[in-house]
Image (cartoon, rainbow, N blue to C red):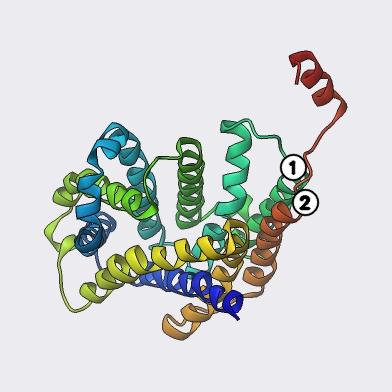
Amino acid sequence: MKTRTAFLYPLIAIVLWSGNVIVSRMSAHAIGPEAITFYRLLLAVLLMSTLVAAPAWRNRAVIWPHLGQFAILGFLAMCLFQALSYLAAETTTAANMAIFTALTPLLTVGLSVVLLKEPPTVGVVGGGVLALAGLIYLVSGGDPLALVHNGVRPGDLLMLLAALVYALYGVLLKRWSLPVSGWQSTYMQALCALVIMFPAFLATPPAGRALNAQTLPLIVYAGGLASVILPFFWVRGVQLLGPNRCAAFMNLLPVLTAAGAMALLGEPVRYWHVIGGGAAIAGVICAGLFPRPLRYRGMDVALKASGS
């Protein structure tokens, strides 16, 4: 019974995440991407300060030497990823945004091969090829040859870049393994990101950072539910179920987002969303199902030569 209840934590987190994708679409043309990124960070920092500020201050001797790393992590996940997502929302659909975001686990493993020198696996190589084919089918609207004539929508390219940025964040987070609790790490990243975003916020035209009845609910959702409540449920789920089980819930993100976009935004789901998105998600699943290292004769020779 406890295990079943534990599955609610990542499920609720993914539901909130899908809602955040829809909020990103709603914010397009309503508020500048730099402004909503800054506002959500400000609200998140204010909320987390009530519980985390005091423990973080007491732990400052441990935190201070890693301030530069917190700044890099905060910039990647809370500034660049979020701003790219809001910018992408202006020229792509919520379903496409969710599919690209759901590729993050696969991209994280791929970057780990390059940056952490982890051996590639059968699942990563095969899943990567399958995911790439699915994405080509998706962004071409079911006609890959059309990409030659029409190119790719800017929003899709921006979301691919955003997913790569978040994957890099995951790799660095694993590599550095900072000696602080999850909440203190998130809090310090948010503080650093808030400082980094402030100049961009000031550079935004007044019309692009206006607070009104249309933008305030979006900021509250992004800064409160998506930036504070969502991480709580996700971290709790990882503690109870482990990272691999929770990562599997990412595959629900495109489905839940597409359903929400149909209901709230009137975005239709086309056959290329189902086929292309399905192939892309299948690629992500393959990366987890086939963890056997990919070895070939040349690799074995190189390993023996290096003494491995």
205 left or right, relative to 130: left
Dot 1 amino acid type:
Thr
Residue at left offset 40%, top offset 57% = 85
Measured as percent of width and height from the top left, residue 27 is found at 31, 68
Q: Is residue 198 left or right of residue 124?
A: left
| Residue 258 is at least partly visible in this image | yes
Up-down relation of residue 38 to residue 234 (above or below): above
Distance, label 2 to label 1, CA atoms, is 7 Å
* Quadrant of the snapshot with the C terminus: top right
Q: Nearer the viewer, residue 196 or 301?
A: 301
Judging from the image, what secondary structure is the residue with disc 2 in?
loop
Q: Position of residue 83 (x, y in %)?
A: 34, 53
Which of the 4 image quadrants contains residue 140? bottom right
Where residue 71 sits in the image (x, y, percent)? 30, 40
Say if residue 28 shows up in the picture.
Answer: no
Image: 129 above or below 63: below
> Which quarter of the image is occupied by the N terminus?
bottom right
Q: Secondary structure at mark 1?
A: loop
Q: Is residue 301 left or right of residue 87?
A: right
Mark 1 burial class by Cα count in 10 Å: few <14, some 14-19, many 20+: many
Report the residue at 62% width, 69% height from top.
Answer: 273
Tag of residue 290: 2
Q: Work out whether residue 207 or residue 292 is closer to the camera in this orientation and state it.
A: 292
Q: Is residue 80 left or right of residue 273?
A: left
Give the residue at mark 1: 121
Query: Which comes before the other along the chain, label 2 or label 1?
Result: 1
- Callout 2 touching callout 1 (CB < 8 Å): yes
Q: Residue furthest right?
A: 297
Residue ID at (74%, 44%) = 125
Outermost residue to the bottom: 263
